[in-house]
Amino acid sequence: MSNQRAVELAAEPLEADTPLFAPGAGGLVDYCTRDGADSLRRKIEAYWGERGCDVMVTLHNAGFHAAIRAARYEIRSDLVNGLPRSRVKRAANSNDEPA
């Protein structure tokens, strides 16, 4: 983070009852909560939808995790190396064309 951004964040003190990971708290979102994971799922689907690709993204309750001392949610998708399957197949087919 740049020093300027750190100063901007420090200049806006949070109220005592404002959670650190919440929309509006400096733009931080906890993607491990159900709401946060669902928000991330919708962003991923919208991103690829705007590019004409259908992707499947699902939420999974991973339960309590001792390291973070909280229950968490995970997202899983049918992306391959971060790309929709249709794009991966097209890229593989274009490399297999005979010379």
Image (tube, rainbow, N blue to C red):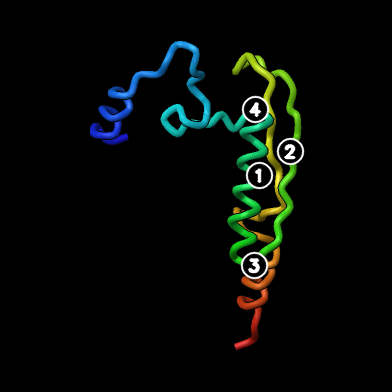
Query: What's the amino acid at mark 1?
Result: Arg
Query: What's the amino acid at mark 2?
Result: Leu
Residue 52 numbered mark, or none: 3
Q: Relative to the observer, which residue lies in front, 10 or 75?
A: 10
- Apparent side of residue 19 relative to residue 58 in the rendered image (left or right): left
Q: Relative to the observer, which residue lies in front, 5 or 25?
A: 25
Label 1: which secondary element: helix
Query: What's the amino acid at mark 3?
Result: Gly
Quadrant location, the N terminus: top left
Label 4: which secondary element: loop
What residue do we see at 73% from left, 27% from top? 62
Label whose residue precedes the other's in the sequence (1 or 3): 1
**Residue 67 on image: x %, y %:** 61, 17
Query: What's the amino acid at mark 4?
Result: Thr
Residue 59 numbered mark, or none: 2
Residue 41 numbered mark, or none: 1
Spatial distance from mark 3 to mark 4, Cα to Cα? 29 Å
- Apparent side of residue 70 relative to residue 2 in the rendered image (left or right): right
User: Crowdedness of circle 3 by 10 Å Cα count: few (<14), some, many (20+)?
Assistant: few
